[in-house]
Image (cartoon, rainbow, N blue to C red):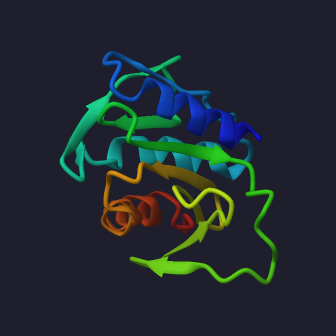
């Protein structure tokens, strides 16, 4: 339900300007380190949209445009994801698409789940491709 609330908040705030309100996740265990590594690797621009501030500020949340694209690192495993669900592999990262919310994608890695919301006005496959490299890099197992 939290993801739905976040999506509704994003949709309501689109076009309002200023910081986008998003509930930051609270990563645990290995996700903390992976998400900390991910933040500086994320692009400044994504699908033509520049990075935007989010409120409250969090190192685990990144927003582009007026909330059309939002990333939350360290979220819980998607409730709708079954062990037998097929993931779409993009750039070496497995992506789960929520069957109830086709604009909500979750990168599934060994260290962290990374949730990405992409508005219908954006090109989701390109956004996910551009995010796959930094996610793969940040969530690679340390040797």
Task: Report x, y in % for residue 55.
Answer: 49, 18
Instruction: Give me the residue at 57% from left, 39% from top.
Output: 7
Q: Quadrant of residue 109?
A: bottom right
Number of disc labels: 0
Closer-to-camera residue (78/93): 78
Above or below residue 9? Residue 78 is below
Relative placement, left or right, of 92 versus 85 is left
Above or below residue 39? Residue 105 is below
Residue 59 visible? The answer is no
Residue 73 visible? The answer is yes
Instruction: Give me the residue at 40% from left, 34% from top.
Output: 67
Relative placement, left or right, of 10 versus 18 is right
Instruction: Give me the residue at 67% from left, 66% from top.
Output: 99
**Quadrant into which the N terminus falls:** top right
**Quadrant into which the C terminus falls:** bottom right
Task: Report x, y in % for residue 50.
Answer: 22, 37
Instruction: Give me the residue at 62% from left, 56% from top.
Output: 101
Closer-to-camera residue (42/104): 104
Task: Report x, y in % for residue 121.
Answer: 33, 51
Relative placement, left or right, of 71 versus 18 is right
Task: Report x, y in % for residue 5.
Answer: 67, 33
């Amino acid at each position: 339900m939290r993801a739905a609330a976040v999506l509704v908040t994003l949709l309501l705030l689109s076009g309002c300007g200023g910081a986008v309100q998003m509930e930051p996740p609270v990563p645990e265990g290995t996700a903390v380190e992976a998400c900390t590594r991910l933040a500086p690797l994320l692009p400044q621009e994504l699908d033509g949209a520049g990075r935007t501030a989010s409120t409250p500020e969090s190192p685990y949340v990144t927003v582009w445009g007026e909330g059309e694209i939002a990333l939350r690192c360290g979220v819980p495993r998607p409730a709708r994801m079954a062990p037998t669900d097929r993931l779409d592999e993009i750039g070496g990262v497995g992506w789960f698409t929520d069957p109830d919310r086709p604009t909500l994608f979750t990168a599934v890695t060994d260290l962290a789940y990374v949730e990405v919301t992409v508005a219908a006005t954006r090109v989701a496959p390109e956004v996910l491709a551009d995010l796959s490299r930094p996610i793969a890099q940040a969530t690679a197992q340390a040797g």
